[in-house]
């Protein structure tokens, strides 16, 4: 079993910053509090016809040793090392310009999804997918996610 080296910064064990490409495309940050809990935030933009500013925040439940199996030949316990699946719940603020009325529209949504992060020394590469239920100004459904990388301090 491989152990991951954690750096102590305040009450966090791990603090990472990086980039995400997808919906949204921008910057990402993650603070890991224990081996099983973290908070991730993203700030980014959509690259479509109507540019939008996204702010997201999620509490993540981490599952560091969920991918285990027993080798049939040797009977040994095996696991995929440094692969960290997670489930997250959080919220999203999306600001977009209404060019017809010359005003900014705020959309609020609830996010529930997950992903997986692969840790290599001080670096993490992640892939995530979050369905979003928009609750303001109207009820609607979106799908967000992306591929990203972080460096941990």
Image (cartoon, rainbow, N blue to C red):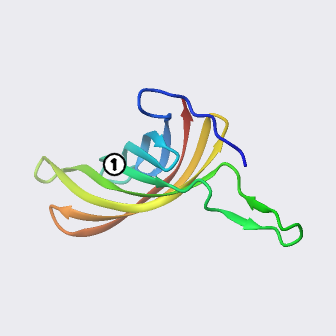
Quadrant in the picture for the C terminus: top right
Image position of 138 with respect to 23: above or below: below
Q: Is mark 1 on a helix, strand or loop?
A: strand
**Extreme residue toward the front, this view:** 75
Q: What residue do we see at 15% from left, 61% from top?
A: 137
- Picture coordinates of residue 100 (x, y %)? 14, 54
Total marks in image: 1
User: Local crowd at mark 1 within 10 Å, few (<14), some, or many (≥20)?
Assistant: many
- Picture coordinates of residue 59 (x, y %)? 38, 51
Image position of 132 with respect to 120: above or below: below
**Extreme residue toward the right, this view:** 73
Q: What residue do we see at 37% from left, 51% from top?
A: 58
Q: What residue do we see at 51% from left, 58% from top?
A: 115
- Picture coordinates of residue 127 (x, y %)? 54, 54
Residue occupied by mark 1? 56
Residue 150 sits in which quadrant?
top right
Question: In screen coordinates, is 139 left or right of 141?
Answer: left
Image position of 43 with respect to 135: above or below: above
Question: In screen coordinates, is 28 left or right of 140?
Answer: right
Question: In screen coordinates, is 32 left or right of 116?
Answer: left
87 or 26, nearer to the observer: 87
């Amino acid at each position: 079993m491989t152990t991951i080296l954690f750096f102590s910064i305040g009450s966090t064990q791990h603090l990472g910053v990086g980039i995400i490409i997808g919906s949204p495309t921008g910057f990402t940050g993650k603070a890991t509090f224990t081996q099983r809990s973290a908070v991730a935030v993203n700030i980014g933009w959509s690259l479509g016809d109507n540019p939008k500013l996204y702010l997201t925040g999620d509490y993540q439940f981490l599952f560091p040793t969920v991918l285990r199996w027993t080798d049939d030949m040797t009977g040994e316990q095996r696991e995929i090392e440094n692969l960290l699946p997670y489930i997250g719940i959080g919220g999203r603020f999306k600001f977009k310009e209404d060019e017809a009325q010359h005003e900014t529209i705020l959309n609020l949504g609830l996010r529930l999804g997950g992903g997986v992060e692969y840790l290599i020394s001080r670096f993490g590469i992640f892939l995530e997918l979050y369905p979003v239920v928009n609750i303001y100004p109207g009820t609607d459904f979106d799908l967000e996610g992306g591929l990203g990388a972080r460096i941990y301090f």
